Image: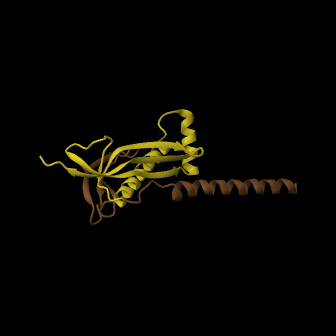
Chain colours: A brown, B yellow
Amino acid sequence: MNWLNLATGYIGIQLLLFISIVLLSWFIWDKRFKSKQGDEVPPGFEKTEEIMIDPTTDKKMRVYYHPESGERFYKEEIK
Amino acid sequence: MIIVTTENIANYQIKEIKGPVFGLTVRARGLGKDITAALKGLVGGEINQYTEMLEDARKQALDRMVKNAQAMGANAIIMMRFDSGEIGANMSEIVAYGTAVIAEPVES
């Protein structure tokens, strides 16, 4: 039954590859958008009145704005 | 940067119109969370994986629009809107747009 071993091996490799992609996607690639987010507001950023509550984490985030670069920064508001 | 969805800004006068400004993003969920979302779709309820994706897309589109408006020399965006579309089964396009202007406080 050489062909059966080959088929099992082929399916096994395919399955392993699929599971690897799923795990890599879950833990490494598929991250939340956090390019400008943190606990420490970088220098030059001004506090704004804009607040948003994240719909899935329920975290209250305040927006800080840098008037020269036009960048926005998100910081969690601790009550 | 003042961002409003209205045509005018209270207590401000629009001095100069810089032009239309946009912020665009296309985001997708990875295979792992896509499978979880598909399973959740079978039983109903909120699909958190897609809520996260759209919230992140909205944030990123807004950030890009503000950066573009700042590059145009504006200090406010009026008539701000969001628009969305689909590219493929698990990708979402969100565009934030408005009119970049220079607004000055009205002397009372």
Residue A50 placement (x, y as % from top left): 28, 48
**Which residue is at 88% across, 54% downward?**
A1
**Up/down of B80 relative to A71, above or below:** above
The quadrant where residue A46 appears: bottom left
> Would residue A72 appear left or right of B82 to someone viewing this image?
left
Q: Number of labelled discs?
A: 0
Residue at the extreme top: B44
Given residues B52 and A64, the one toward you in this image is A64
> Would residue B10 appear left or right of B69 to someone viewing this image?
left
The quadrant where residue A26 appears: bottom right
Residue at the extreme bottom: A43
Which quadrant of the figure contains the N terminus of chain B?
bottom left
**Which residue is at 33% across, 63% downward?**
A69
**Which residue is at 87% across, 57% downward?**
A2
Residue B76 placement (x, y as % from top left): 30, 51
> Would residue B8 appear left or right of A30 to someone viewing this image?
left
Residue at the extreme left: B108
Given residues B104 and A30, the one toward you in this image is B104
> Would residue A46 appear left or right of B42 to someone viewing this image?
left
**Which residue is at 54% across, 42% downward?**
B37
Given residues A67 and A30, the one toward you in this image is A67
Taking the image as drawn, is residue A57 in sight? yes
Residue B96 placement (x, y as % from top left): 42, 47
